[in-house]
Amino acid sequence: MTSDVTVTRFAPSPTGYLHLGHVRSALAGWRVARGAGGRFLLRLEDIDQTRCRGEYAEAIIEDLIWLGLSWDGPVRRQSEHFDDYRSALDRLEALAVLYPCFCTRREIRDEITRAGGAQHGQSGSPYPGTCRDLDPRRRVEKQRSGIDYAVRLDLARALALTGAIEWVEEKEDGPHRQLADPAPLGDVVIARKDVPTSYHLAVTVDDAMQGVTLVTRGEDLATATHVHRVLQALLDLPTPRYHHHELLTDAAGRRLSKRDGALTIRSMRENGIGPAEIIDRATSTGTRGGPLAGENWRQLQSSGR
């Protein structure tokens, strides 16, 4: 594969059936890849084995085929690639940018409350750093005790190594350079005691290993991109371009989710709604005239810019 080939991907988690919002995300990457003569990949982000189910994974594949959204190459399942994530985790450990965190969610909330912190960020609040400077002997004792722990990224140390970093964000009016600012997410979880990865690490490694050149995903994941750029810089991985598309919303302006059972592709199929109508709804329902309908987005499709 040459570097000028456009490679996009659709990466759902098999924790439920596909809904219109998923179709919108899949179409965003599929149209760009097909318009540019590139490659469109399918990845199943199934590292959470407590919530992911095989029946949902098979339903995702079946629904995409039914919609006419073909992909190139085999489906990548994250649960089959833990060795890749372990290798990346080892590299981060060698850089001394990771530390074990033994705090429970309740302890973290209580510490933030005591410090007078306000909740923000994707997961509610950034981690207050309770275990960041834990005495090394105490840290070893806790790890040997067998209690559960998370592995967190020491963001300050990481940024000291990377310096200022940015990425190219494809917007309706063309490409824009975006400066990475991961501070609002704090010291994110990179792995856990018995699982050598997290969403942040797995998606970063996967995009690099699959040669993805343009990441198309919902604007709700824009904040995570700041962390992914830090990981790419630390691991010396290539930087794809990004497009964070507008989310579909219901009549009240709420984001569609897996809780909206009536809007799953499975239920719509059962009610006699065909692929063409579903695709039309996915590209127009609850939007503000965003990039999937805009002239600049059509130009991006045809050029694979």
Image (cartoon, rainbow, N blue to C red):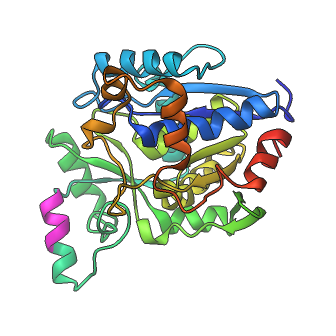
Measured as percent of width and height from the top left, residue 23 is found at 49, 36
Most prominent secondary structure in the magenta stretch?
helix
Measured as percent of width and height from the top left, residue 79 is found at 40, 23
> Which residue is rendered at x = 27% and y = 43% of the image?
260
Depicted 248 relative to depicted 60: above or below: below
Depicted 184 relative to depicted 96: above or below: below
In the image, farthest residue toward the front: 272
Viewed as shown, does residue 110 lie left or right of 93?
left
Between 89 and 112, the residue placed more toward the observer is 112
Measured as percent of width and height from the top left, residue 37 is found at 82, 27
Q: How many marks?
A: 0
Between 302 and 142, the residue placed more toward the observer is 302
**Quadrant of the image occupied by residue 110:** bottom left
**Quadrant of the image occupied by residue 105:** bottom left
> Which residue is rendered at x = 44% and y = 43% of the image?
21
Viewed as shown, does residue 240 lie left or right of 272?
right
Depicted 254 relative to depicted 242: above or below: below
Between 236 and 283, the residue placed more toward the observer is 283
Magenta span: 105-110
> Which residue is rendered at x = 55% and y = 28% of the image?
276
